[in-house]
Amino acid sequence: MEGFLSLYLLILSFHGFLFWGFGQEDAAVYIVIMKQHPVTRHFGEMEFGGSGISHVDSGSFNTLNRQRNFSSTDRNYNSYLLRLQNSLLRRTLRGEKYIKLYSYRYLINGFSVLITSQQADKLLRRREVANVLLDFSVRTATTHTPEFLGLPQGAWIPEGGPEVAGEGIVIGFIDTGIDPTHPSFSDKLSINQFPVPHHFSGICEVMRDFPAGSCNRKLIGARHFAASAIIRGAFNATADHASPLDSDGHGTHTASIAAGNYGIPVVVSGHHFGNASGMAPHAHIAVYKALYRSFGGFAADVVAAIDQAAQDGVDIISLSITPNRRPPGLATFFNPIDMSLLAAVKAGIFVVQAAGNTGPAPKSMSSFSPWIFTVGASSHDRIYNNYLVLGNNLTISGVGLAPGTDGNLMYPLITATHALKNETTIENELYLHECQDSSLLKKKLIKGKILVCGYSIRYVLGLSSIKQALQTAKDTSAVGIVFYMDPFVIGFQLNPTPMPIPGLIIPSPDDSKLFLQYYNNSLHRGKNAKTIVKFGGVARILGGLKANYSISAPKVMYYSSRGPDPEDNSFLDADILKPNLIAPGNSIWGAWSSLGTESAEFQGEKFAMMSGTSMAAPHVAGLAALIKQKFPNFNPSAIASALSTTATRIDKQGAMIMAQRAYSNPDSTMSPATPFDMGSGFVNATAALDPGLIFESDYGDFLSFLCGINGSAPVVLNYTGQSCLFSTKTGSDLNLPTITVAFLNQSRTIMRRVTNTANDEYYSISWSAPHGVSVSVSPTRFFIGRGQQQNLTVVLNPTMNSSYASFGGIGIYGSQGHKVFIPLSVIMKTMNKAASDRND
């Protein structure tokens, strides 16, 4: 295949030379999008049926990562589209020169073609054509999640590629600020202009460390909020900076994930890792700094930031922050941050929040309210691995963005504690094995060997650093460095660390134990058993600068907080599904502040690799900008619905998405992910731009839900200024794209209402019932016109007594290829006596 592709490209190059030779000076590549539906919209991928969804079909809503088996009908339609495209070109450009490069028929119906601007205008005037877009230069994007999410070949294409993706949309980041000098936020790198949207009225603060000119047409607003921190005496002016400047790194990182410029070179520790891009590289950024390096933040400052962002006119708010503890009081929803975000939603702002990093325990969720879109963290398919090969042929996996040792040569191993100078009398001090002070070590003894260091809790706390250990290795002329993991460091997420010399960290305490056993057993000692006469252990390091790609992705990361959503501090469950979905959050490249200190290993670098739900949330914020760009009239619940109902529940190889269940050796503890792990599934960027049916809720619905909480009337009045009327609405009564019931003790009727955002379409419904629950849905088939609504009735009945959560789903499949999935979760099931007698 690669040989054929190379030959094909050579032919194209030759034809291109001839084409230019005929005098077509303004010839360029254009992408032509046709109105006729592509294959995936024309035919559904699943058989219709009312008896339920089989396990094989349970993940087949994804149209991006799954290999599709084409039926003969599909192939005929596929061929039909190809003939249609070729016929359009022949008829429109009769007698003229052009070269068709690619035919798109699966996800979109269109083609790319080398033509002149006059020919492009001719095509645009054809009734069969939806759009004609000028192509753009593309390089490999090593902030790889745009590729993993399918943006270059999917969601970016209809709007014109990365040069316009997110254009006109303002994302507000409530975080640790931003480094305005970073190229990810420049407005001078794009061939297209960055006109500031008319609806945005924010300002850019001018401070000594954030001078005039820090903002531009890309970074259009920057403020900071620290009054509460200052009045408490928590603010450190030297470390925290009373300005929008990011001295932590976190805010710069998250902003670049969502909306960083396209094609920015990622160079770390002298190594090039490709080019970076945000999800919506042409969106605008407004920064509201309310968190700080030395202490975090306070709700009063965060609420002020939210309020200002709404006033300025942002379209989306991204919060990669969570409370330090579950909010006290009547319900988790009643806290200043969530209630201010409810007001933001009322103003039409879509709100994205990180789920938290306290998983994998149940009810560890740190984002609670149904009007907030909560994002958990998954892996993606890019992996940086390096390996340590020992003299006994044992190979140990490690992490480290580092080169390997030379060829197949094996080098002696030596620990820092075995290289101490004779006059050093503090050998038993714990920190000596961490390689933090080269002056205590025998340089001649280490020279030409691989230095072995311990990775203890001091590294986690920032008391020791990889950079200092690397400096020790350099000072002692070591050929490489290896860190073994202290057994007390568990549940800590290790990101691949940049190293200019061969090196790695062994993340597993078990592997570290095997490594130390080999090292100690290979030592040759003198007669007194204390003197080491030869370091017999040898090893070589295989480099970790080149990424590998896994097919078993995505998977839910162990640290990602889990549902069910706790309604209050007594751990009662809410009738609300959290998280809403998962997105890439593990080992994510992003821009890094020049003053960034959150990850000491990347201090002074332009980019850093970080992990957490903090990295997952801005992925969704950027994708929401693409949805808002395409559907400017979508309210926040419509955007949330588009993201949720189109999410996929299968990984790249077509298997069920798995979830890690433990801190230690997490991959060995995986089991199939449930909605309490991943919500509706893994975000599908391309499908979210064409959701078909959407579920809409508004401020009044959320207010009725809050009023339905027993004893909530005075609390609602205090937060909203509105009096509660009588309400019995629960979370399951909200018109959400999910159904969650915490306690089912009798027949329960749940209503849903869908709105059609696409063309007229026929839909069919099937479902799978949670264990211990009977389910019926009506109607099972319906026709819905564009802009029309359809009510759905779901009836649930318990069929057994159980306190264990069980899960099912409702699938709604359209004749034009739209697929909508509603996860169904029931926790406590209790049958009344009459029902129990009937089942006996």
Image: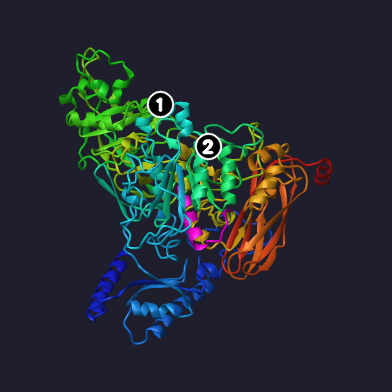
Q: Residues within 10 Å of mark 1 (few under 14, many from 20)?
A: some
What mark, if any, has residue 261 been given in the picture? none
Q: Which residues are magenta?
A: 618-636
Check disc 1 and give the amino acid type.
Pro
The residue nearer to you, when weighing 668 against 264, is 264
Q: What amino acid is at disc 2?
A: Pro
Mark 2 or mark 1, whichever is nearer to me: 2
Residue identifier under label 2: 360
Asked whether, in this view, residue 438 is left or right of residue 222, the answer is left
Instruction: Determine if the magenta segment contains residue 633.
Output: yes
Front in this rendered view, residue 827 or 653: 827
Scheme by which the image is coloured = rainbow
Is residue 742 visible in this depiction of the protein? Answer: no
Q: Which residue is mark 1?
A: 487
- CB of mark 2 within 8 Å of CB of mark 1? no
Residue at x-position 25% and y-position 72%: 13
Residue 813 vertical placement versus 396 (above, below):
below
Quadrant of the frame with the N terminus: bottom left
Q: Residue at x 62, y 71 (%)?
A: 760
Between marks 2 and 1, how big is the CA–CA gap?
20 Å
